[in-house]
Amino acid sequence: MVFNSYEFIVIFLPVAFAAVALAHGIGGWNAAFAVLGLASLAFYANWGPEFLGILLVSIVSNYVVGSIITRSKENKVQSRSLLAVGLLGNLAALGYFKYTNFFIDIVNQTAGASFSHLSVILPIGISFYTFIQIGYLIDAYNGMVKEKSFVKYFTFASLFPCVTAGPLVLQREIFQQMEDRKDAFLDMTRIAAGLTLFTIGLFKKVVFADSIAQYSDTVFNGVAGGQGLDAMTAWFGALAYSFQLYFDFSGYTDMALGLGAIFGIMLPLNFNSPFKATSISDFWQRWHMTMTRFFTNYVFSPMAMKGMRRAVAGQFGPARKFAVSGAWPIVFTMLVAGIWHGSGWVFVIYGLIHGVAIAINNAWRYFNMPELAPVTGWFLTMLVVVCGLVVFRAPDVPTAMTILTAMFGGNLLTLPQGIELVQLAVADVVPMIVLFGAIVLLMPNSQEIVSSTWISTSEKPESIGNFAKKMLWLPQARWGLAIAGVFVVSFSMIGSDSSFLYYQF
Amino acid sequence: MRLFETVASVLNIDAGSLTNESNGRNTENWDSLRHIELILAVETAFGVTFSMSEMVSMQDLGDMRELLVEKGVTLEKAA
């Protein structure tokens, strides 16, 4: 059951809302959180009983390990060993479900063996709920977990707005909202803002992402199937996919944040106009922001800190200091982030491209090189992002290489001979690319539009642009009507088979 | 040495532009790498060490000041 489906919108959402509201009426917020946990279970169970079993084992075992770590914080050896057990357990489960066949491929390629693939299921959201709970274990080890209730932990780890594709929430930002909660459940302004954000997200997904998907599919599937292509088709395919993923993922995120607000749980921002970024570091502060935060806190910072201490102790020169405390930690972090997305060499290369690009970006600032004009920075950033996404979308490395080669004029003089060329409806895709480009670069983003009622745990921006002020959503009848119109259009366009792209990660 | 001056010298900016609310999002040159350098500079300047959890939980200079006070550092009022 995806957010953009009739069964979710018509059945699950109203029933879950009524159940949680009723629970709140009877037993206050604590009862509401418990029923929200049960509703999340029902939501997740819809993907299949075997998936539900894996989620339950994960939640119960992480809770048990986390609680013991918290209790044994005076005994560093014990808590450190338990943390190691917890991390290994989570990574082993993730490795088994997600990477088994990739390991088999590597073994086959390097050792010339011919092991066949195992039929391992990939539980939906496993990368997300595993990492959310790894964050919990590390926080427990660092003495940062205050909450002890299993019911609240259960709701936190299974929360249906985030369990399938994020945001990657931190324990403290959810548990803080569960402490001594006294406000009304039926806060109509908060709920209206949540519904508005949900509707904007639904529109982005079913109207924008799903309409441009066919063009990126034509190019990527065509090339994977052995067709050739010219530079223009390659660029249009790459841009079509970039916009598809943008609207798919930002649409999902809007819906997740909106759903959280409807049920009284604010979530962190995950998307903040990433295509307006003027540097690659800026891009990662705006795209999948909670993933960046996770990897910065738990991978990059500890590595960089260690490197920096080594550099100071060893009195390294600036270049060596930057290499051990800046370049290497960021390349390694992005490599892990790339592999986190999925198994396959394309994700390894995707991570490396971004790691090297951020390292160059950081070096540029670190060594006080002259600042680039914003438009130059934006152009270089988008070049890395779009090329990176070609690798990210391609089913294998040769497909990615064929498209990238075509994009940079590899086929300019002589088109591939003797093979069929990808046929793209250029007259249809170009207006879409222009329209979507204008929207992502010129329009205020959805959280700016609903910023009159701030429904996120992230800091509210101090000010919004003039355009955003003109489009500012207010809990008024005319806005209600406009959003109802957007909803009707989106609802009528819901496809029967349109999952979110991030569900595969 | 005053806190804001230490921070300003790492970030290569004017100490007068810093406040307790200054953080990586609203301050020039303060990226994740400078953040690490900054913490190390503050550790050296005030003779303290920050744990990983303290490093991650520091949201702004106000938090850093509170942690320093907790560690027994005496800061000048306007520092």
Image (tube, rainbow, N blue to C red):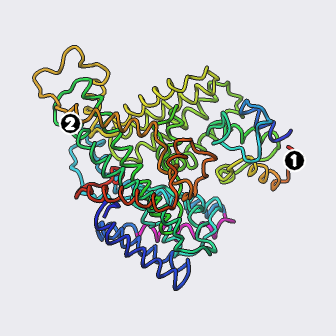
Q: Residue A176 at x, y = what percent?
A: 61, 66
Q: Residue A434 at x, y = what percent?
A: 34, 33
Q: Residue A66's image quarter? A: bottom right
Residue at 20%, 36% in the rendered image = A224
Camera-side residue: A442 or A373?
A442
Camera-side residue: A316 or A416?
A416
Q: Is A261 located above or below residue A337 in the figure? A: below
Q: CA distance from mark 1 to mark 2?
A: 63 Å
Q: Is residue B28 left or right of residue A102?
A: right
Residue extending furthest toward the bottom: A26
Q: Amino acid at mark 1?
A: Leu
Q: What range is drawn magenta here?
A: A56-75
Camera-side residue: A281 or A327?
A281
Q: Residue A410 at x, y = what percent?
A: 27, 19
- Can the viewer see residue A93? no
Q: Residues within 10 Å of mark 2 (few under 14, many from 20)?
A: some
SS assignment for the magenta stretch, majority:
helix
Residue at 39%, 43% in the rendered image = A246
Q: Which mark is residue A224?
A: 2
Residue at 39%, 51% in the rendered image = A251
Tags 1 and 2 both on a single chain: no
Q: Which residue is mark 1?
A: B75
Q: Residue A134 at x, y = what percent?
A: 51, 58
Total numbered labels placed on residues in the image: 2
Q: Secondary structure at mark 2?
A: helix
Is residue A453 within the magenta segment?
no
Q: Is A104 located above or below residue A194 in the figure? A: above
Q: Is residue A495 left or right of residue B45?
A: left
Say which chain tag 2 marks: A
In the rendered image, the quadrant that contains the N terminus of chain A is: bottom left
Residue extending furthest toward the front: A478
Q: Is A212 located above or below residue A233 in the figure? A: below
